[in-house]
Amino acid sequence: MIQTFVLTLILLLLPVWMPATASAQPAPMPADSVRAILDELDGAIARKPEYRARKEARIADLRRRLALTADTLQQYALCKELSEEYLHYQADSAVRYINRRAALLPVHGHPELVDEVDIDRAAVLGVMGLYADALHHLQRVDAARLDTALRVDYYHACRTCYGWLADYTIEHRVKRKYLAQTDLYRDSIAQNAIRSLDCDIVRAERAALGGKPDEAVGILRRLLQETDDPEILSYLNYTLYEAYMAKGDTARQAYYLARTALWDLQRSVREYASLHKLARLLHERGDLDRAYAYLNCSMEDAVACHARLRSLEVTEIYPIIDRAYRDKAAHERAVVTGLLIVLSVLALLLVGAVVYLYRWMKKLAAMRRDLYQANRRLHAANLSLEQTGRIKEVYIARYLDRCVTYLDKLEQYRRSLEKLAMASKTDALFKAIRSDQFLRDERKAFYRDFDKSFLDLFPRFVERFNNLLQEDGRVAPKAGELLNTELRIFALIRLGVTDTNSIAHFLGYSLATVYNYRSKMRNKAVGDKDKFEQEVMRID
C-alpha cells in the first residue's frame, strides 16, 4: 500500500515538477539574434577606417594641445591621455609618451606620479608581450604608499599581467601558479575598489571561473543595464562570453563575443581577444567566410598595435582556418568550373537547337509562302471557274433562246416565200430571195443581244478597258450603241476567244480588219503593249 501511495503521489506531482524544471533551463539563443549581431559586426569592420579617423582626430587634438602648453603638470596630463589613447591602439607610440612623462618627472608636489609611470609602463609592456619587464616595473612599486585609486589601478595592472602570463604559458604547473596570482590580485581589487561596479565585476569573474556561471550571468546582465561606458561594456560582454563558455552555450558565446568585438572596433581598439576567438567559434560552426574575415582583421590590428600575445593567439588558429578556407574556395572553384562546363554544354545544345529551329522556321515560312501562293492561285482559279460558269450559263441560255427565235423566224420566212410561190408572184419571190435585209436585221439583233449579255456580265468593261489606254486612244460607243467594233473585238477576247479567225467569223469581218483593230489598240496601251490583251482578260 505504501509503495502504491508513493507511486501515485509521484505521478500527481510529475506534471507540476516537469514545467518547473524546464523553466529553470534558459531558452536557447534565437538564431536571428546571432545573425543580426554578426551582420552588425560586419558593418563595423567595414567602417574601421571611419572609427580610426575619429581616433586619429582625438590624438591629433591632444598632440596639438601638448605642443601649445608650457606648464609641466599640464604637459604630463596630456602625455598621460596620449599614452592611454595609444595603449591598445599603437603600443610603441604609448611607450614614447610614457617616456616623455618620465622625462618630466619629478613634478613638484606629486611624488605618486613616479609610481603611476611605472604602472602604466607595465601595462604597455604587457600589451607588447614583454611580461618580465612589465613585472619588473610593477615590483618597483610599493602598494602601501599609493592612494586608493592608484592602488586599484596597480592591482588591475598586476592581475592583467599575470593573466597574460597564464594565457601565454603552456606548462600546467606554471599556468596554475599564474592563475592563482591573478585570483589574489582580483581579491585585492575587490577589497580596495572605490566603485561597487568593480566589486561586482570581480564577483562575476570569480563565479564564472569557479563553476557558478548562472550567478555570473545574473550579475553581469544587471551591470549591463547600469553602465554606458564603452570600455566597461566591452569587458562585461567578454566576461559573459566566459560564463557561457563554462555553460557550454555556443550560440550565446558567439553572441557576446560579437558584442565585445563590436565595442572594441567602435572604440578603435587594436589589442583585443574577442574577434579571433569568435573566428575560431565560427569556424567550428561552419561559417568559414566570416571566420576568415575576422581572423584577417584580428591579425591586421594585432600587428599594427605590436601586441605580441594577440599575434601569437591569431597565429595559432590562422593556419587551421586558412587551410579550411582555401579548401572551401577550391571546392567552390571546382563547383563553379563544373557549372561553367555544364552551362557551356547547355549553351552549345541551345545554339544547336536554335539553329535547327531557325532552319525549320525558314522551311515552314517557305511552305507557308508556297501554300499562300497556291491558295491565291486556287482562289483565282475558283473565281475564274465561277465566272466562266456564269458566262456559260448566261450565254447558253441566251443562245438557246436565240436559236429557237431563229427557227421561228426561218419558219415564218419559209411560209412567206411559200405563199408568194403559191400565188405565182414570181417577181416578188425572186426579189425576196435576192434581198439581204433579213440577214442584216438579224445580225444587228444578234450583236445587240451579244452586247447586252456581255455588259450584264461585265458592267464596267468599257470604263476599265479605257483605263488601259492612253488618254487620246480611248474609245466610246456611239449614241444608241452598247459596244462598237473595237470594244466588241476585245469583249470576245475577254470571253476567251483570242483566235483572229474565230473573231473575224463571229463579227463578219476580214482577218486583216480584225488584226488591224487589235494592233491599233495595243499601240495605244498605257503599259506593256505585249501584255495588253492579258490585262484585258483580267477585267472583271
Image (cartoon, rainbow, N blue to C red):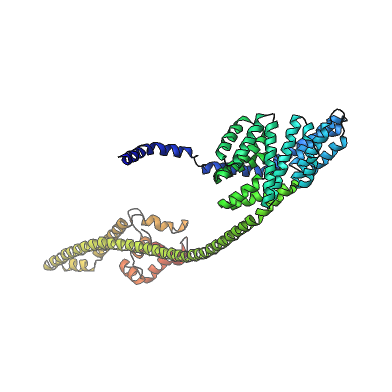
Relative side of 271 to 226, left or right = right
In this rendered view, identify the residue nearer to me: 505 or 439: 505
Q: Residue furthest left?
A: 422
Q: Quadrant of residue 444?
A: bottom left
- Quadrant that contains the N terminus: top left
Q: Residue furthest front?
A: 2
Q: Residue at x 57, y 52 (%)?
A: 284
Relative side of 300 to 281, left or right = right
| Residue 56: % across, % down | 76, 39
| Residue 254: % across, % down | 58, 45
| Residue 6: % across, % down | 34, 39
Vertical comparison of 319 with 214: above or below:
below
Q: Quadrant of residue 370?
A: bottom left
Does residue 108 show up? Answer: yes
Does residue 270 show up? Answer: no
In this rendered view, identify the residue nearer to me: 251 or 343: 251
| Residue 380: % across, % down | 36, 62
Vertical comparison of 159 with 452: above or below:
above
Q: Residue at x 31, y 70 (%)?
A: 505
- Quadrant that contains the C terminus: bottom left
Q: Quadrant of residue 51?
A: top right
Count of numbered badges drawn on the protein: 0
In this rendered view, identify the residue nearer to me: 16 or 312: 16
Vertical comparison of 471 with 514: above or below:
above
